[in-house]
Image: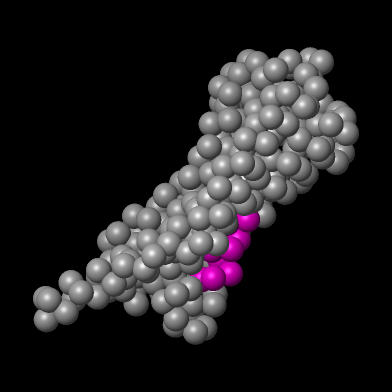
Amino acid sequence: MQSKPIALTILDIVSIIALGVSTYFALVFAPTEAVMGNVQRVFYFHIGTAWVGLVGFVLAAVTGIIYLVTKDMKWDRIEVAAVEVSTMFFFITILLGSIWARPAWNTWWTWDPRLTTAAVTELIYIAYFMLRAGMEDPEKRARFGAVYALLGGLSAPITFMVIRLFRTIHPVVVGNQSAAAQGGFDMSSNMLTAMFVAIGAFTLIFIDLMWHRVRMGDLEEKVEQLKLKVSM
């Protein structure tokens, strides 16, 4: 078994520190929003987790294309890691959005275009793992997974752009406000700082978890190869 790289250990520590710093900026440094009060503070983690979730889905689509071109299983492992970590973060995004929505919209959930596309995106990637689990041949699994990740990756930009393309109650906090948005707020400089700190922190955490998941994927592939040798 390969020993854990020193760089990964350092990244583990830096990621924990970054999460703590981001928590401080969200709970203490950022001012209390005048209308929503303290519940608005979940916004910073909501944005941070959404950012890495969508970036990971796009990364999975890109690595899927590279796999289809090169047939190198390394890219399949990176693709799986990106989807798995991003699916987890995107689920957290949806949960945090529901917590924010309760006081802002007086409901935990509504079939608003942004929320609907986010839920569909999450279900798409849950189905990705079901697809892979149903295939025993590694190359066939990687090939179908790559095509699926490529098609699923289209949902990421759609989810991001939907509040800018349609009338929606989900606010466009950065940029022009939607006319129908409820719960929008103008961001002060301190709020913007807290948001960018959260984005940076969750980006580090995403890279850290990705690295761990890729290493786990390497071990899984070795175990699978040993099983195939034994069964022959």
Residue beneath the point at 49% across and 48% down: 87
Q: Quadrant of residue 24?
A: top right
Q: Quadrant of residue 215?
A: bottom left
Is residue 190 positioned above or below 80 on the image? above
Residue 90 image offset from top left, x and y in percent:
54, 43
Q: Nearer the viewer, residue 45 or 108?
A: 45
Which quadrant holds the C terminus? bottom left
Tell me the magenta residue range.
54-64
Left-right relation of 85 to 184: left
Is residue 221 positioned above or below 45 on the image? below
> Is residue 156 among the parts visible in the rendering?
no
Magenta span: predominant SS is helix
Residue 224 image offset from top left, x and y in percent:
25, 70
Q: Nearer the viewer, residue 157 or 111?
A: 157
Is residue 60 positioned above or below 137 on the image? above
> Was residue 59 drawn as part of the magenta stretch in this picture?
yes
Residue 88 image offset from top left, x and y in percent:
48, 45
> Was residue 37 drawn as part of the magenta stretch in this picture?
no
Q: Residue furthest front?
A: 6
Is residue 67 positioned above or below 157 on the image? below
Residue beneath the point at 12% across and 76% down: 230
Residue beneath the point at 73% across and 15% down: 37
Residue 140 image offset from top left, x and y in percent:
34, 75
